[in-house]
Amino acid sequence: MAVRELSCSLAMAEALKEEMERDKTIFIIGEDLVSNGGIFGQFRGLPELFPDRIIDTPISETAIVGAGVGAALTGMRPIIDMHFADFVTTAMDEIVNQMAKIRYMFGGQAKLPLVLWAPDGSGLNAAAQHSQCLENWFVHVPGLKVVVPSEPADVKGLLKAAIRDDDPVIFFQHKKLFNQTGPVTEEKYIVPLGKAVVRRAGTDVTILTYSRMTYFCKEAARELARQGIQAEIIDLRTLMPLDFASIAESIRKTRHAVVVHEACTTGGFGGELSARITEELFDLLGGPVVRIGARHVPMPFSPVMEKYVLPQVEDIVAGVKKALRR
Amino acid sequence: MAVRELSCSLAMAEALKEEMERDKTIFIIGEDLVSNGGIFGQFRGLPELFPDRIIDTPISETAIVGAGVGAALTGMRPIIDMHFADFVTTAMDEIVNQMAKIRYMFGGQAKLPLVLWAPDGSGLNAAAQHSQCLENWFVHVPGLKVVVPSEPADVKGLLKAAIRDDDPVIFFQHKKLFNQTGPVTEEKYIVPLGKAVVRRAGTDVTILTYSRMTYFCKEAARELARQGIQAEIIDLRTLMPLDFASIAESIRKTRHAVVVHEACTTGGFGGELSARITEELFDLLGGPVVRIGARHVPMPFSPVMEKYVLPQVEDIVAGVKKALRR
Amino acid sequence: MKISNLEKKALLRKMVEIRLFEEKIGLLFQQQLIPGFVHLSIGQEASTVGSCSALRTDDYIISTHRGHAHILAKGAEPKYMFAECFGKVTGYCKGKGGSMHIADFSKGILGANGVVGGGFPIMTGAGFSIKLRGTDQVGMVFFGDGASNRGTFHEAVNMAAVFKLPIVFVCENNRYASTSPAEKMVAGGSVANRAHAYGIPGVINDGSNVLAVRDSVAEAVERARRGYGPSIIENETYRYKGHFEGDRQRYRTPDEIQQYRLTRDPIDRFETLLIDEGVATQKEIDAMKTAVAAEIEDAVRFAMDSPLPDPHEAMQGLFVNP
Amino acid sequence: MKISNLEKKALLRKMVEIRLFEEKIGLLFQQQLIPGFVHLSIGQEASTVGSCSALRTDDYIISTHRGHAHILAKGAEPKYMFAECFGKVTGYCKGKGGSMHIADFSKGILGANGVVGGGFPIMTGAGFSIKLRGTDQVGMVFFGDGASNRGTFHEAVNMAAVFKLPIVFVCENNRYASTSPAEKMVAGGSVANRAHAYGIPGVINDGSNVLAVRDSVAEAVERARRGYGPSIIENETYRYKGHFEGDRQRYRTPDEIQQYRLTRDPIDRFETLLIDEGVATQKEIDAMKTAVAAEIEDAVRFAMDSPLPDPHEAMQGLFVNP
Ligand SMILES: Cc1ncc(C[n+]2csc(CCOP(=O)(O)OP(=O)(O)O)c2C)c(N)n1
Ligand SMILES: Cc1ncc(C[n+]2csc(CCOP(=O)(O)OP(=O)(O)O)c2C)c(N)n1
Ligand SMILES: [Mg+2]
Ligand SMILES: [Mg+2]
């Protein structure tokens, strides 16, 4: 079948269309979805196709997320649009104390097949309250799955998997990637949760990354190649469940690892990954696992400062060299 | 001066009394503080002394935390009682997007001298929604300081430091330690933020811990000593700022480290610590940094299961041996 | 709402069952046979039973930290509830929930909730689900006077009003939220008064009159079922026991409690009514109480005799697709 | 509230300043000289200026994502605001805040807020602070129709009512929250109507009549200042521009906008009134507008000429005690 170049936006809309056609229990709920097809145009075309199944609500995030929880408990398969990932803060009780715990604490009586979809990340000069990457909070909460795609094909395939999954999935999609294009086959497919993918093969160091930083890492790898260092890039795609087998396989080969994410380094998922690698693969390691992430400040507005706070290609290059002790 | 045995509850009340006498801008706001002196009796005696400065509110956590933020911005030094640490979830926007960011994002115009005090932890068979340790969320948020005392003397000294600090401090006090007693001098003192303390000297392994797990670690160290292993225990006391110098000093000696906390291992502060140790001290390490924390499930109610999910003394002993490869 | 003599006797029986269940839980807690926290609702039976009696089995409820009564009134079985409170594997939640987290999805009981006001948003979801699936179910969310001050109340009631969701918001105003009097904390005078802010009905009931509650709730349920949207019901009631078992209760006098017991006890009042109306004799009622007491004892025995979970079972049941 | 001719002219001048400021920001944004998002409030000037004119310098305001007007009306200087919007080091927040996060604590401006409804809880704190410090300051929190559906609104208004905090809640109902019409999303008919749920005054004003707004707000401010507690003010207004610059605005017709502009423009109306009343001549007004336009140009120039921050300054100012 043909392969098209699609943006992440269009790939997402296609996933939603295919799934909503297949399963009438799927609906989307959130703010400002209908009129403009979502604030990033990610739902464009869908309101016309499924007029009753895309619901614009008041600005009431606890009720929106709670609505997803309650609907999932009673036979539906909701997709909750969080508007901006930063606003998870306004519904953390619904996510952490309800969504994540209900199935377990009621002894498995219920299931919660829902997707909480949240556009995250910086790079739009949107300042402190509209630029965060908060994925590690949710990795830390038992009962949630966490997805962080980078490529359009994965946005489509993972979103379909997340929708079909019977557990709550937090799906972070990077705001700067909506217009990012990539090849997407016309054939129907899903990308299963919990499978990482090698984006670039290499022998000297394993770069573990996800979401927008995958692109930065590819650029860094090109630069490193020029300097004679072959980096293997693994795009984790989902953080919970985590494909540690693929990670271990790569590190067994390269003996060095660098973790790169956009979230603040301190307290972030890089720590989890680094710790786990050290715990399980210590004897193989030829050097420390190096973490690259945002500096420890809220995101400043001014573009020059935003850039300084975010990891840049040259930081990744430097991090790899540090890991390799070169 | 005399040294008394005080419980954490009494040590806390004493700190509050001393500070509130000293500084009239301090007040305490939260639910059910007055009538019973707080749900853990932690404020007993204070409402009589400072009748207008201990404020019982409706059950409105966003307004309570917001009230702390707004009062701090306008000249007061509030202490916010979060009732149970689990309920930070109901006010995360106020904590993360407001409290943590306001100073920075307004270019340093304001300061936020406030303490958000939250009793956390499990061990009371209080089940999934009343048993969490969420400290790493806040370590991950630039703009917050995080305190996690274990001993009554530190509860007092650190609370005083937190109150005097001009930045927002999240102060987690473990629910199971309210009745824990320990020596507290009658002399006035503060314990500065950002200083760890060695609870037990040892040469073979460094155990890094905090809050209630400090006591578990001491017991484990006694057992390890019987088996010929001398563990050094460092009680971190504050996670942000972190006293990495003391950590490094100990590991330089022992060459092995184990991190123990009650929070879920996955995505927790242990990852941060392990990663940092590996990054900065890799060449010194004689083995992997091992993390011990709760298993990856919400806290189950039944005591037999709760115990199973929480780290136990024997898990710590086993973790140390794993770190030492014995 | 029309009601037969049989139904009246069933209402009394359910109130008695709840009362005896709760008294037993209190006793077992004192004897340290029940771990964790326990919140009893003795005194509030008419509010709960009257409300749930207006529902069908396929209707939904969401309960609170003070949830035993709601769950019993919606049809759950005492033995599995005791077992849950004991942390036994035979409990409704296999020992993972405990007193504050009992659910029985087969009876439409979407669970008790340890977060005050945690149920409001979830019930909006059940409401959307009912509308999207096109059934005529109704959702009822119980909450306290204290919970009405949480933002979740506002967001959920507005949401329900905007979409005419089939939800009945039942406030059991027992005059206190933990240590805090409702009259101090609920601005505007009453919870029902808040209904007007959303353009929906708000009704205050004598919460110790089971028939009055039933009638008023039935109207709200009917309204919801027919697609006219949500209502707020406020039942004025009282809890005889502390906020939790062990509460020192310095916020009220023993006298105040005694007054309620003597003058407004929902069971006493309904018993008297049934006898006065000739619906039941004292003897019949006494026999019924003895029978219920025996059932409760059986249920406790079931729970006592049940095994504790294997500790490893803690690791089961987090995900459907692990 | 009594008002002199001088004050009337000052009100007009402030509205003109805001209008020209906002138009300039729109232009600069189109020219890609301003990074990030920009939300303009052209059309809403009377609501904002009328409200702030009832305040003292030591009173507090908290603003929203659509905050330029509030901040200007409370006395901030355009040049530091432009500089902030440009991300320059001379901006109010040294370039760290941007359009959505401008504050001037020296003028009681506790900041704009990118979280809708984020200001409500914070203002309760200012209210407690005022009470505890024993001053007679007042706090005013601006919010939109959309924000009134957030739980923070409910919690903060109830809290303010319970403690009689000196707060005026000023809703600028511009008929839309982003793409959503208020009439669909705000159950109960109006935001002011919600006041009764808390037993506090709720008033609806013609938000394009600056004097009407000023009078009504002044009453609420006075009430708060004297210790009688909070009020809700709802100013019916309209924004001419999209929700943000670049909004496709498929949720309304150009005609609707045009109608407002023609019939209810707050500046036009007030200009006509001042001329009719003989307070000012057209010539005076034109001269004033020219002067304001020149000031705005100067302010832009200041901002343009200012340096960008040194990137390393991103690491400054997180903590007072690092
Ligand atoms: C969000 C939240 N805040 C605080 C608590 C602690 N708490 C448990 S019950 C309770 C009082 C609830 O009062 P009310 O809603 O009137 O119900 P009642 O206990 O009277 O049945 C409080 C404050 C909680 N569980 N959840
Ligand atoms: C908590 C939260 N939810 C959603 C948003 C996204 N958002 C920004 S402005 C806005 C509309 C606000 O409408 P309203 O309160 O009426 O103010 P207006 O824009 O009309 O001035 C929305 C939904 C946000 N910033 N914060
Ligand atoms: Mg109550
Ligand atoms: Mg609006």
Image (spheres, coloured by chain):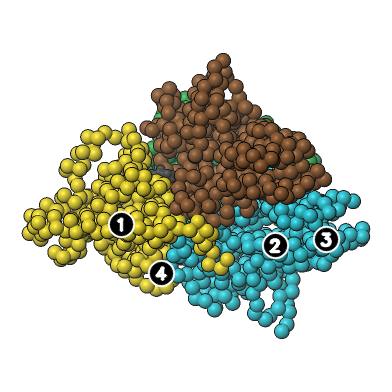
Chain colours: A brown, B cyan, C green, D yellow
Q: Mark 3 points at which residue?
A: B254
Is residue A249 visible in the rendered structure shown here? yes
Task: Say which of marks 2 and 1 sits in front.
Answer: 1
- Residue type at mark 4: give it: Lys
- Residue type at mark 3: give it: Thr
| Residue C96 screen position, x and y as percent | 70, 42
Q: Name the residue under label 1.
A: D301
Please give left or right for residue D288 compared with residue A65 in the image: left
Q: Name the residue under label 4.
A: D131
Residue under the image location 52 percent in, 22 percent down: A4
The disc placed on residue C218 is: none
Is residue B11 or residue A212 the one in the foreground? Answer: A212
For this orientation, the residue located farthest to the right is B227
Local crowd size for mark 2, using a 10 Å CA cut-off: few (<14), some (14–19), many (≥20): some
- The kind of secondary structure element at disc 4 is helix
Which quarter of the image is occupied by the N terminus of chain D?
bottom left
The disc placed on residue B244 is: 2
Q: For marks 2 and 3, give the CA distance.
A: 15 Å
Indicate if the residue with disc 4 has its beta carbon within 8 Å of ligand 1.
no
Q: Are marks 4 and 2 on the same chain?
A: no
Q: Which of marks 1 and 4 is nearer the N terminus?
A: 4
| Residue B160 screen position, x and y as percent | 60, 72
Q: Mark 4 lies on which chain?
A: D
